[in-house]
Amino acid sequence: QDPLASVTSLRGPPPHPPLCAMTPLQAPTEPALHKRRHAEVDALAASATPLRQRMRRPAPTVGDIVSQRWTAVCDIATTLADAVDIMTMHDRSAAAVIDDAGALLGMLTENDILHAYSMGALPTCGAGDWLCTRIARLPPALLDALTVRPSCTLRKAAAMLRAQA
């Protein structure tokens, strides 16, 4: 007796005939199989959004980056020593200097402060006074040329900076 026959009888008949038992008419022909697969692929391609379109994200803007971190701000009367404290406390290398109405006058950078001290400026010198010198990195005169709106793309902002260099 065949030992596999008893195992087969316990499991019952197979759910479908084995492939070798199929006649050529029952098995899908190769061209028909390819045609069906091509139709499925074409249907998927027609319904799917192109990969580039799905992966396209809006271009990052200056506002996207700036809004991630708090901006250090000093008023016009802030001393250089206090500006150092503000930048250090908030781990920034620059601080926006604003007037009493809140309008941006310029940016005070670490390099500005080092330069001011190396030229003999006192720690009690006002941030606004330093910005009015022609030595500051971003004095009020250059503010319009070097300031971008939050909606400006990073690519455009970088191009503007390269043009100023």
Image (cartoon, rainbow, N blue to C red):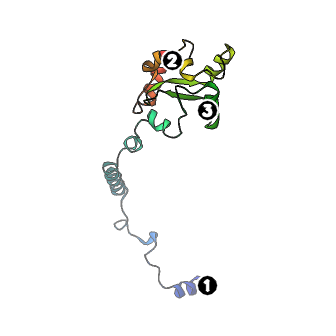
Q: Residue at x 54, y 11 (%)?
A: 134
- Residue 80 in picture, x, y percent from top left: 62, 24
CB contact under 8 Å: marks 1 and 2: no
Marks 3 and 2, how far apart at CA? 18 Å
Label 1 neighbour load within 10 Å: few <14, some 14-19, many 20+? few
Marks 1 and 3, how far apart at CA? 85 Å
Q: Nearer the viewer, residue 164 or 95?
A: 95
Q: Earlier in the sequence, mark 1 or mark 2?
A: 1
Residue 18 lies left or right of residue 94; in this view the side is left
Closer to the observer: label 1 or label 2? Answer: 2
Q: Is residue 25 above or below residue 13?
A: above
Closer to the observer: label 1 or label 3? Answer: 3
Q: Residue at x 45, y 28 (%)?
A: 155
Q: Secondary structure at mark 1?
A: helix
Say which mark, if any, is on residue 139. Answer: 2
Q: Earlier in the sequence, mark 3 or mark 2?
A: 3
Say which mark, if any, is on residue 87. Answer: 3
> Please, what is the three-letter code of the amino acid marked with disc 2?
Pro
Q: Nearer the viewer, residue 39 or 44?
A: 44
> Where on the picture, by quarter, is residue 153?
top left
Q: Nearer the viewer, residue 95 or 75?
A: 75
Label 3 neighbour load within 10 Å: few <14, some 14-19, many 20+? many
Say which mark, if any, is on residue 95. Answer: none
> Where on the picture, by quarter, is residue 74?
top right
Q: Residue at x 40, y 70 (%)?
A: 22
Q: Earlier in the sequence, mark 1 or mark 3?
A: 1
Q: Residue at x 43, y 72 (%)?
A: 21
Residue 6 lies left or right of residue 122; in this view the side is left
Residue 22 lies left or right of residue 72; in this view the side is left
> Please, what is the three-letter code of the amino acid marked with disc 3?
Met
Residue under pointer 1: 3
